[in-house]
Amino acid sequence: MAAKQRQATQRVSQVAAEQPGAEPRRRGPRAGTENARRGGVAVREKYGLDFFARIGAIGGKKVRERRGADFYADIGRIGGQRTRETLGAGHYERIGRMGGFRQRKRERQTDHS
């Protein structure tokens, strides 16, 4: 089985070498497919949910070390600009109202308890 995978990888690499600018195909199933989902389920069953939290934290620390804290401010600003471009400024008014409504609802529930 490993020999077949190696041969397939070599063929993909050869094709990629013949086509300048083409990236070699990544190993494993394509993201979003049923096979990818089953692979994720298998990893979850084998290692547990805490595994994902641990590796996510490790990845987050690496990003912070390599790019610094300003990186997060930059990507947040870019994301906010894109949201404003696609959904409009009224979007922020709507979500602000929803947040205020939920907060008032929580306050009323704690007052009656």
Image: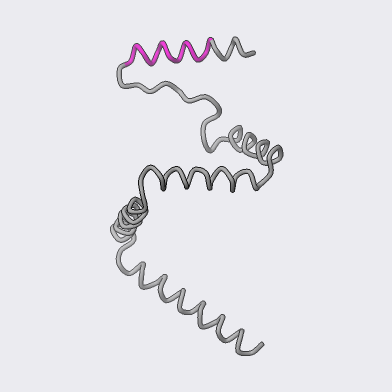
Which residue is the extreme one toward the right? 45
- Figure quadrant of the N terminus: top right
Q: Residue at x 36, y 53 (%)?
A: 69
Whether residue 106 appears in magenta in the rendering, the answer is: no
- Which residue appears at 66% of the width and 47% of the height? 49
**Colour scheme shown:** one colour
Question: Which residue is pictured at 31% across the width and 53% down the height?
Answer: 74
Q: Which x, y percent locates residue 72?
A: 37, 53
Residue 100 coordinates in the image, percent (x, y):
45, 78
Residue at the farthest front position? 65
Question: Is residue 61 or residue 48 the one in the foreground?
Answer: 61
- The answer to which image quadrant residue 78 occupies is bottom left
For this view, does 112 lie left or right of residue 27? right
Q: Position of residue 53 (x, y in %)?
A: 59, 48
Q: Position of residue 87 (x, y in %)?
A: 34, 61
Q: In the picture provided, is 43 more to the left or to the right than 99?
A: right
Magenta stretch: give its range.
7-19
Q: Is residue 84 above or below residue 9?
A: below
- Numbered marks: total: 0
Q: Residue at x 52, y 24 (%)?
A: 27
Task: Relative to 10, say whether 110 is above or below.
Answer: below
The chief SS type of the magenta part is helix
Residue 8 lies in magenta, yes or no?
yes
Q: Quadrant of the C terminus?
A: bottom right
Seen in the image, is 74 located left or right of residue 62? left
Between 105 and 62, the residue placed more toward the observer is 62
